[in-house]
Image (cartoon, helix red, strand yellow):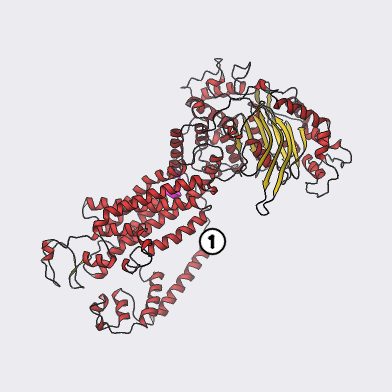
Amino acid sequence: MLYANPLHWAIVIYGLIQLGENYKEPCSDYTQLLQYCHVYPRMTVGNAFLKFYGLKTERHLVWVGYAIIIAWILVFKLLSYLALEKFQHIEVNPSLPRQKKRAHVYSNLDEDNEASDIFSEQLIVNAGKLNVASHKNDKRMQNDHEVLHDEEASHPVRTGQLAPGPGIPKLTPFAVSFLRRQQEASPQENFHPDNGKSISSYIPAIKPITLSFRNIGLIVKDRKSKKEQSLLRGVSGYARPGTMVALVGSSSSGATPLLRCLAGRVSHGTVEGEIFVNGAKLSTNIFSRISGYAESLDAHQPYLTVRESLAFSASLRLGATASRRQKIFLVDLILELMGLSEVSNLLVGDLSYSTGRTYELSKKLTIAVELAANPSILFLDNPTSNLDSVGARNVMYAIKAVAGTGRTVISTIRHPSARMLSAFNKVLILNNGGEQVYFGPVGWNSSKLVAYFVSIPKVPKYDEKQNPITYVLDILGAGIRKRRSVQNYGEIYLESQLGKKNEAEINKLCAGGDAGDGVVVSEDSGYAASYCTQAAMVFLRTQRFLYRNVHYTFGRLAGAIALGLLLGSVYIQIHWSSSISMTSRSLFIYIQVLLIGVMNANNVIPQLGSDRLAYFREKRASMYAPIFYPISWAVSEIPYLILITLVFVAIGNGMAGIGTDTPGHFFEYWFGLFLFTLTVTYFGIFLTIATPAPMLAAFAMSICLSIWITGSGVVVPKLRIHFYAWLYWSNPFQYAINALTSISFYCNTKSPVCLACPAGKPCPACPCKQLTDVGYTFVWDRLKHLRSLNHQRISLDFVALGGMSTVLALLCVICFVFFKHNSKPSS
């Protein structure tokens, strides 16, 4: 291995160039000053140094070293070519054994995957019934659509809600059907779906909400020019329980900013206007308790199952307002409602291995996690993004089912088809600059929407083959065909009969005209769950992440085993009777600390960096206090680091015979290595939290490790570190190396027996090891002088490492709570 090692030949080359041609002084002049001259007094200083450390002294070996290194480059290139040419790797499922499967409740809302008939199965929400019907022709579909979306017939849609409202004391038919299937799947449970109980006995009640908003505006400052600009201007509308409202416009129209304004998620800028819930003007911090916001970015913890993801959200966002039984039933019902029952026990990261509908299921999961909070109103940011036509259709079915439970649904949607837009009761269209140009019914195939714009004088004629939204955006000058709008469609809407009718209705709702739906009771703006529940759930989530993350957890353990075997076999039972063997034995500790430190510090950065995306979504939903996230990582890493360091020391040190003289020495050595590993791991967590991107954290980690390694007192002795002495005392590497080296080499050379030994001669009576090639000096005295070691400092070294890890953990918490990049605004 030595002669095939390119690193060895690189050192040979540098040694011959630097020392072989220089340092020509005879060693006989330095036998008392230089150890290698004492051993080889007849050689030059340079050659004696090379010979002493086992390097080559022949000049022609420089070219041999170059040839071997170039040969390795060619071999690696050839192997890379062969690997690309011959090998085809199949991606391996990274999951560990899954949670024990429960009896599946197969959804009657699960759709087929045939795209030929987009509305082959249409959810009908009428008079509290949620059924799946087959539509065979457009005429019947149109009739059903008019019944479902008639404003008078469906205002307010209370009979479809899952919560008991006025005059609705019984279970809805969908819930009864669901409970019956639960009874069939789990006969040992006693659900009693027909006993006439209120559904609140099984599922937390939903508070019906009518959201009305008037003259909404949003003013933000441009980051470059620092000038204020208006993204929204005088937008008004409303949404009732059981209905769906679409927010539509071009990319610069402000549809997503409007959604954030209504949901109380504006992090930058000034919101103008008024927002009312059931006629009561509320502060935006209440919305996190009564609303759900499904973001366009599907960020989830990949090592939780689908069911666990929903249970995590329900436990933290419902808190003590619902019993454990109610939370379980709510999660099951949402899985059924969203068509996720069949994949409920799969890890989220495994969905791509199990089905061909990864994006569709991820989008459904994003919505389902928000529904687990049992919200009265659901905000959706472009729920059909990145989906094909089949996936978009299935997600729209699920959203329609959500509205059928009595919830209010408001969603942005980009360039929907006529049929997709027809699933909404109303649509609010914004022009460039955030100006409202329409708010009203959609109609079948967007007929009512098109009829409104066609009735405006001087507008282009509508082609029935054209997408209605494309037609409307072209009229407004915001479509693909860039044309200048010759009319002010915002003023036309305000002066139209529809605009005046909407204004009267909005004023009525803002004044409490729809209070029959039940006034929302103001709740405290804190977290729904207690701090104990938050800590327990976040800790459990992080533990599941670490336990099920095979690449990270098992990779570290396998790496510790492999490194232990490698070091142990290289240094197996190494003696220490000569200067070379003493140096090699001491470097075992240096290499061991270096390898385990670099491995753990670098591995934790990408894991925490990827998991932080899910945290951002959870923070915006106000699930738990931010302080619990870094604490959960700090605590959860401890048992794994204990196991890794214990295995590493047991294998490597056991084979090398270092630090294993007594059980006390073994435990002391392991404890010191554990404290060091904990410190550098916490330092990796700190850098990941303190920097906005994992790449920056990895770059900073490489620099810090290089500085620490250089200033650890091994490469550069402590006596040669002058100005940078502060770096030495703030270096966890030097504390670990001093403690571990002292544990392994210390021997009391000041005992009477050893003091009585004659100078320069062997002394069998003294138990301390002696160097045979340096005048029989004691190993500990020699090493202590070279490395500036101090055996009495071991306990202080442990205290220093423990203090460093504690300080780094506190810094992690402080940076995580107060640094701006750890509380990113909504995507």
Q: Any magenta on residue 643? A: no
Q: Is residue 617 above or below residue 742?
A: above
**What range of the chain is rendered magenta?**
548-553
Q: Position of residue 51 (x, y in %)?
A: 30, 77
Query: Magenta span: helix, strand or loop, mainly?
Result: helix
Closer to us: 253 or 43: 253
Q: Position of residue 813 (x, y in %)?
A: 45, 45
Closer to us: 412 or 119: 412
Q: Is residue 785 above or below residue 439?
A: below
List the residue tagged with mark 1.
Answer: 84
Q: How many marks can you see?
A: 1
Q: Position of residue 689 (x, y in %)?
A: 48, 50
The quadrant in which residue 177 appears is top right
Which quadrant is the C terminus positioned in? top right
Which quadrant is the N terminus positioned in? bottom left
Q: Is residue 136 above or below residue 802?
A: above
Residue 705 visible from this viewpoint: yes
Q: Any magenta on residue 551? A: yes
Along the horizontal axis of the image, is 392 left or right of 795? right
The quadrant in which residue 432 appears is top right
